[in-house]
Structures are given as structure tokens and as C-alpha cells.
Amino acid sequence: MNKILLTSIISASLFTLGATCSLSTVQAAELSFAHIETVGTSTIEAAADMAIINVQVSVNADSAKAAKDKADEAVSQFMQRLLKAGVDKKHIQSANLQLNPQYTYVQNEPRKLTGYSASRQMTITVIDLNRLNELLDSALVEGINNVNNIELKSSQEAKIITQARQAAIDDAKQKAQSLAKGFGEQIAGVWEVRYFPQQANQPEMYRASMKMNADVAQTYQQGQVAISDRVEVVFRLK
């Protein structure tokens, strides 16, 4: 059996064994030597010890200025409470104001202005996950009335990303070696590596998307952060 024919057989076997190959048939045909293509993947889970929370204040008032003032006051008061609680200012971001007129509509009549709505968002990085409930409670006190999401994170993210990348490489190599051995062949070396960095963090996401109440803090559950990586490799056969 010549090497070119063996390449076709091995490529077909990859799909049979569940390995995913991203090269199109045309691209694969361009390689005129015997080869194996594998995709290495990995996922590492770690306990979450941080969180990024996004909260919002939404208010209505008769005038645009009154609505803006109420939203600004709620954000300012909550920010002061966060600073007093020891949250670093660099971990607090407050988004721009959104101000919109409110109308009522009656058929065959001109629309009628009834007031204005104002909203501002804040994003807070919570370094100590144990304090999350406390900070959510303090948001309630200052009039923050919506939770958009709570994103779990790990302080060891950079280290885990490196580990996940190496695990994906090892997975690609193991698959290639196993396939080559099964066909009585040997790996000669790496011909091509295709690597597209994955999203650094794929955390569990808790979305509230509703008005906060006294039970919101209790509904929060700690979870795991899952970090994944992927590498595609073309190995030459001897």
C-alpha cells in the first residue's frame, strides 16, 4: 500500500473515531505526502473565587433633569458605599447615562409626552466572592433595581489557560500516535499547527434580568469556571 493511499484511509478513520478536522477536502488533497490530522481539545474546571457583576438603575420622572438626577444619585451613593466597603476604584465602572422620553399613544390622537426614563449601568469586579451577597444587598439599599448578570471568574485564569493549552497539545499528539500505531505507521513530526485562541474564560453565567428584591442574594450559587482550548495539527508520517 503506497503512502498516498494510506493518507486517504487515515483521514477517513479520523472521522470514524470522532476526531474533528477543519480542513476542507480540497485543502487536504493539496498535501501530497502521508499525514494525519488531529484536533486536540481540553477543558479545565476550577472553583470560582471572583465575580463580575453588572447592575443597573432605571428610574422615571416628569422631566429629563429629574430622571437624570435620580439615576446619578443612585449610582453615586452605591459607588461611595462600595469604596467604603474596600472595593478598589479601578474595579468599579459606571456606564454612560441613557435618557429616553416616554409617550402614551391613543388612536387618532397625537402622542402625549408623559415623562422621561433614565438608566445607568455599573460593572463591579468582586475580588472576594464571599462578599458578593453583601454587595448585592448594598445595591438594593441605594436604589439599584436591576441585575443584568453575574459572571463567575477565577483569579488563576492565566495559569489555567496555559494548562488548558498544553493539555490540548498533548491530546492532539496522543490521538496522532494512537492512529499511526493502529495502522502500523510512525509519526515523523509536525507539519503544520493551526491555533486560534479560544475565549479565555467560559464561566457559568447567572442572569437575573429582572428587578431585584431581597431574595436575589440568596438565589446566587457559587459554581465552577470552565476554561477550554483547542489546537489543530497536521503530522507527517514516516
Image (spheres, grey):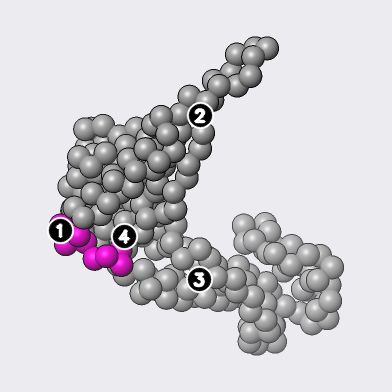
Label 2 to label 3: alpha-carbon separation = 53 Å
> Earlier along the polypeptide chain: callout 4 or callout 3?
4
Q: Secondary structure at mark 4?
A: strand
Residue to which mark 1 is pinned: 84
Q: Nearer the viewer, mark 3 or mark 1?
A: 1
Residue to which mark 4 is pinned: 92
Of the residues shown, which amino acid type is indicated by label 1? Lys
* Nearer to the camera, 29 or 125: 125
Is 235 situated left or right of 218 in this image?
A: right
Is residue 210 in view? no
Give yes or no for contact between labels 3 and 1 (Cβ–Cβ under 8 Å). Answer: no
> Earlier along the polypeptide chain: callout 2 or callout 4?
4
Q: Is residue 72 magenta?
A: no
Q: Nearer the viewer, mark 4 or mark 3?
A: 4
Q: How many marks?
A: 4
Label 3 to label 1: alpha-carbon separation = 44 Å
Q: What span is in magenta?
A: 82-92
Give yes or no for contact between labels 4 and 1 (Cβ–Cβ under 8 Å). Answer: no
Q: Nearer the viewer, mark 2 or mark 4?
A: 2
Residue to which mark 3 is pinned: 168
Q: Residue at x 36, y 52 (%)?
A: 122
Label 1 to label 2: alpha-carbon separation = 36 Å
Q: Residue at x 41, y 29 (%)?
A: 62
Label 4 to label 3: alpha-carbon separation = 35 Å
Residue to which mark 2 is pinned: 102
> Earlier along the polypeptide chain: callout 1 or callout 2?
1
Q: Residue at x 52, y 75 (%)?
A: 169
Is 131 situated above or below 160?
above
